[in-house]
């Protein structure tokens, strides 16, 4: 399977290592609008061809599939061009900047009949797959309540560098630079985490988004710091269960942690997932009477990268698909529209 890596920025190295570890894949080429960066990346990973223009790569055509690791705002135009050329696509999240664009990409992929998947990386967490299986098997009964959070604190600590001087982080705070804030950046991850685990999408929601003042005049250099820093969703799921889903870059003490607790009529299950550790626990059976929680083991799972290649080989699309990502984007769009609050007199 010959693969083109589109975009050679921060995330591209992870994609390159993952695909090069799969013996079925030949990482045939890379492309980036920054020609020098593409050439340097090609040399680093032993990639034979590099391009500065996607059109030239498509004209060459020596690949079967594309891993799209471009910035968020470039996902739509680049993916549409790739789909028109009949190539399979794994696209980074979010699929697009809004639902209409994501829906257009989804329909184009389905009409082209190509494999289309979105890189929701936390699908690679074994504990999440195990929790989904347990919930699906009825081990906690009917889901009644959900609590979930995506916790970061790089606006507080310098564990990833100083955001005030690093464009890598500053662009994530600026809507003009393509950011949808913490909601679009990591909120979509925790939303996928939740909906995948319980097997249901929200049917209604309330949302609050908050942007805090972080610099004099609300800007640093060319960056206007207007993207949301904290997001909170109150949702109802298809079976009537309620949930609270939130994300923030001000959760001091947490570098990058996802938490999920699902409570049901017969038990509960919880996941804590950090950068170097994961804990899955459950309170089921007789333990619900004593509130005892027990750790649950989870077997390793196949990564999205490998499942993308397997889907191409098998000729059957796998999840998470463009369609699923578009439905999540619809929810995010509604959060911006529903960002209101009742003042207490």
Image (cartoon, rainbow, N blue to C red):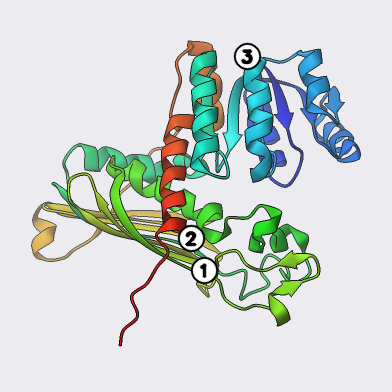
Count of labels in the image: 3
| Residue 331 vertical placement versus 95 (above, below) | below
Residue in the picture at 44% in, 31% down: 323
| Residue 135 vertical placement versus 255 (above, below) | above
Which mark is nearer the camera, 1 or 3? Answer: 3
Label 1 and label 3: CA atoms lie apart by 42 Å
- Residue holding disc 1: 254
Q: Residue furthest bottom?
A: 345
**In the image, residue 178 lies at what x, y percent?**
66, 52
Whether pointer 1 and pointer 2 mark residues with C-beta atoms closer than 8 Å, the reply is yes
Q: Is residue 242 left or right of residue 94?
A: left
Q: Is residue 301 left or right of residue 27?
A: left
Residue in the picture at 48% in, 19% down: 110
Label 3 and label 2: CA atoms lie apart by 38 Å
**In the image, residue 13 lies at what x, y percent?**
72, 40
Q: Quadrant of the N terminus?
A: top right
Comparing 330 with 164, the one in front is 330
Q: Earlier in the sequence, mark 1 or mark 3?
A: 3
Badge 2 crowding class, 10 Å Cα cut-off, few under 14, some 14 to 19, many 20 or more, is: some
Q: Quadrant of the C terminus?
A: bottom left
**Element assignment for label 1:** loop
- Residue holding disc 3: 86
**Element assignment for label 2:** strand
Which label sits on residue 103?
none
Q: Earlier in the sequence, mark 3 or mark 2?
A: 3
Comparing 113 with 26, the one in front is 113
**Element assignment for label 3:** loop
Residue in the picture at 81% in, 69% down: 221
Badge 3 crowding class, 10 Å Cα cut-off, few under 14, some 14 to 19, many 20 or more, is: some
- Residue holding disc 2: 257
């Amino acid at each position: 399977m010959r693969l083109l890596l589109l975009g050679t920025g921060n995330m591209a190295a992870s994609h390159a290592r993952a695909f090069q570890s799969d013996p079925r894949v030949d990482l045939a080429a890379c492309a980036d609008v920054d020609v020098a960066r593409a050439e340097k990346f090609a040399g680093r990973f032993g990639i034979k061809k590099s391009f500065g223009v996607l059109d030239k790569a498509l004209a060459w055509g020596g690949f079967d599939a594309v891993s799209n690791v471009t910035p968020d705002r470039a996902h739509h135009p680049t993916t549409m061009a790739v789909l028109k050329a009949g190539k399979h696509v794994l696209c980074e999240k979010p699929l697009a900047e809004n639902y209409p664009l994501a829906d257009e990409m989804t329909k184009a992929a389905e009409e082209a009949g190509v494999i289309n998947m979105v890189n929701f990386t936390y699908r690679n967490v074994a504990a999440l797959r195990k929790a989904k299986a347990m919930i699906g098997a009825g081990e906690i009964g009917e889901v009644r309540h959900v609590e979930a959070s995506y916790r970061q604190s790089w606006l507080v600590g310098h564990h990833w560098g100083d955001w005030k001087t690093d464009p890598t982080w500053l662009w994530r705070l600026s809507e003009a630079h393509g950011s949808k804030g913490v909601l679009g950046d990591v909120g979509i991850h925790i939303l996928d985490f939740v909906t995948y685990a319980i097997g249901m999408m929200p049917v209604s929601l309330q949302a609050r988004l908050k942007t805090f003042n972080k610099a004099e005049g609300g800007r640093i250099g060319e960056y206007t710091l207007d993207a949301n820093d904290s997001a909170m969703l109150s949702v109802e799921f298809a079976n009537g269960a309620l949930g609270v889903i939130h994300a923030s870059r001000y959760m001091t003490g947490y570098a990058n942690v996802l938490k999920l607790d699902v409570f049901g009529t017969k038990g509960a299950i919880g996941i804590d997932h950090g950068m170097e550790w994961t804990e899955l626990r459950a309170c089921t059976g007789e333990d619900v009477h004593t509130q005892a929680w027990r750790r649950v083991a989870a077997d390793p799972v196949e990564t999205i990268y490998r499942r993308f290649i397997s889907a191409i080989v098998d000729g059957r699309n796998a999840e998470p698909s463009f369609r699923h990502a578009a439905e999540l984007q619809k929810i995010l769009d509604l959060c911006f529209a529903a960002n209101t609050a009742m003042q207490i007199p």
